[in-house]
Amino acid sequence: MGTLIKGGRVVSAAETKAADVLIEGETIARVAPAIDAATHTVVDAAGTLVLPGGIDVHTHLDMPFGGTTTVIDFALQSMGKPMTEAYRTWRAKSEGKACVDYALHMAVTDLGPGDTWLDDVDAMMAEGITSFKIFMAYPNVLMVNDRTIYKLMERTAKLGALVCVHAENGTVIDAIVQEALAAGHTGPLYHALTRPTVAEAEAVHRVFALSELAGRANTYIVHVSCEEAMREVEAARRRGLPAMGETCTQYLVLSLEDDMGKPGFEDAKYVFTPPLREKKNQEPLWEALKGDVLQVVSTDHCPFRFADQKTLGLHDFTKIPNGGPGIENRMQLAYHHGVNAGRVTLERFVEVTAEAPARIFGMYPKKGVLAAGSDADILIWDPEADYTIRAATQSMHTDYSIFEGFRVKGNVRQVYSRGECIVSGGKFTGRAGRGQYLRRGLGEVLA
Ligand code: URP
Ligand code: ZN
Ligand code: ZN
């Protein structure tokens, strides 16, 4: 006896069709029209869309929610310590806590004496970590130099692994930040004003040059925030490089004009990196998603609290923890501002929120598609649901929302994770610790 999701329209990146979905155990047994109810438990999905569970490939997280059934978080290598130690630390951190399946990227900060920790790349691959993150920003904390990027890329190019890059010229940004502080500009708005778009675009350009020098390493630019940076991804793809990228919900729906310049210290809620950009960047980013210049929408979810964490930077914007919460709202916002607004098709919405992430990060077809044999990670999506985003009613462990008051049409009604209904009627019915660590294979380059 299984669970039969009956009467909905099943969506993939390729098509939308009327079909039933039969779940047996943790996986999908069949997707077909009019499956006989027999002895199955029937879930009435009439009037809904049945979608593959969302995959958020860029989180720094505590607690996942909102139609996302898989996350890829970052294990962060400490300078002076090998990657293997970071891997053990991050696996231990998630033990007993993960509500949905999760994987890890390895954030590389140090290649070790004589570059010996480059061999950790191979060790990480054996543990199912096939993507490696580097930061070109945050000097003295996370930033790596071009030599490190080049050496890492040489190794990953040989192995077919992926390098994910936070692309901003950290050294120059640091100089601009010091100039702003010296001039007495200490408020949160200056976080945005000291990180110009050209500093992002220059770094993106450099990444692809280094990839080429290192033997055409597969590269994925995280959180592309502006048109100039996106055009560099476009140019690299045109040159035939294995270049891909994501943008995040905040860059698609928030802007410098609308969301910064609020009274008091409110702007600190929007201090993330890259910062909010001028509104004119939004439509080109949507176009880039539509036209496959960018392949993924993620969140860069960082669940800081306003009351006791963001306020650390009350008198100096450089001390405000960088990042904002958003994992819960990714599917809602991408659907409403993408599909309802006619900017992307329903199928492309599924592609950028589930299928492409699964393909690029080596989880397809276990994740990212509703097909026989795939994990039963399924969203029953009500396209008519009317929902207003409010911090007071959200499930994320934060005391504010960067999307406060945003009204969306379309929301998740039920969420299945490996066959178990874990969200129903807006309530989490799963259990912390049920999420499994995913050993990923090599991903695809979506050319
Ligand atoms: O502001 C952000 N994005 N914080 C998280 C770290 C990063 O840069 O992704
Ligand atoms: Zn980043
Ligand atoms: Zn991030």
Image (spheres, helix red, strand yellow):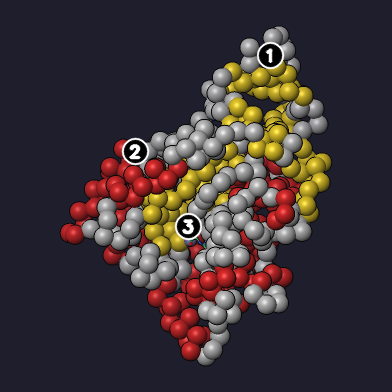
Quadrant in the picture for residue 379: top right
The residues bearing labels 1 and 2 have C-alpha atoms spaced at a distance of 37 Å
Type of the residue with mark 3 = Ile
Circle 2 residue:
127
Quadrant in the picture for residue 326: bottom right
283 or 28: which is nearer to us? Answer: 28
250 or 405: which is nearer to us? Answer: 405
* Labels 1 and 2 touching (C-beta < 8 A): no
Q: Is residue 1 above or below residue 27?
A: above
Type of the residue with mark 1 = His
What residue is shown at x 34% (from left), y 38% (from top)?
A: 127
Q: Is residue 103 left or right of residue 349?
A: left
What residue is shown at x 47% (from left), y 37% (from top)?
A: 96
Q: In the image, which disc is placed on residue 221?
A: 3
Mark 1 element type: loop
Q: Is residue 383 left or right of residue 377?
A: right
The residues bearing labels 3 and 1 have C-alpha atoms spaced at a distance of 44 Å
